[in-house]
Image (cartoon, helix red, strand yellow):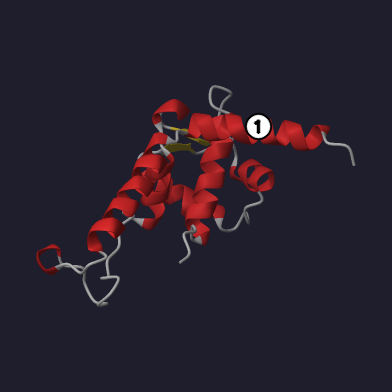
Amino acid sequence: MRIDLGRRADYAVRATVHLARRAGSGRSKAHEIAADMEIPESYLPAVMSTLVRAGLVTSTAGPDGGYELSRSPVEVSLLEVIEAIDGPIEASECVLRGGPCRWEDHCAVHVPWAEAQGALRDRLAAASLAEIAAEDAALARTSDAAPE
């Protein structure tokens, strides 16, 4: 089984981590976000517009414009970012039988699978962009200080 992010959600997480690191320092231009987080610049506007529509990011046009988080990084969870792009994290097919998962006629794997899914959602909801940005900065300092 694979648990990974699709390309758009991956780029959204990277972009919002950049914005979280810059919170309080003004807006970030798309080309700055793309260069800093290794996101194709041509792909970024579509991701950012989805985050704007979800209310997680604000966008300001013009020479002094750019993007910034709409709330403090402490208040934005990793789950919100991922679900803004990919939709709710939930199994839509029955693990054993295939087809739609029906609560009234669930399979033997249903309960543990739903519990694991809930644990994943809970952990992503508990991870704020502030935490992730701080950890990312700490890891960058560690790798910069490592001898070559």
Residue 118 position, x and y percent, is 30, 48
Query: Left of 97 or right of it: where is 22?
Result: right
Q: Nearer the viewer, residue 143 or 51?
A: 143
Q: Going 59% across and 29% down the picture, which residue do you hit?
A: 134
Q: Is residue 74 visible?
A: yes
Q: Please, what secondary structure does the residue beneath circle 1 have?
A: helix
Is 135 placed above or below 53 here?
Answer: above
Q: Who's the residue at 54% across and 22% down the image?
A: 24
Q: Is residue 81 above or below residue 139?
A: below
In the rendered structure, the answer to whether residue 117 lies left or right of residue 42 reads: left
Q: Quadrant of residue 124?
A: top left
Q: Quadrant of the C terminus?
A: top right
Residue 34, how many percent across, how many down?
Answer: 63, 48
Q: Quadrant of the N terminus?
A: bottom left
Q: 99 and 87: which one is in front?
A: 99
Amino acid tagged 1? Ala
* Rendering quarter of residue 27: top right
Q: Residues within 10 Å of mark 1 (few under 14, many from 20)?
A: few
Residue 111, horizontal then vertical, whole percent: 23, 58
Task: Report the residue at 51% width, 29% height from top.
Answer: 130
Is 119 placed left or right of 136 in the picture? left
Q: Identify the residue position indicated by label 1 in the image.
A: 137
The answer to whether residue 64 shows anywhere in this view is no
Which residue is outermost to the left?
104
Q: Nearer the viewer, residue 62 or 108?
A: 108
> Residue 83 appears at what percent x and percent y?
36, 50
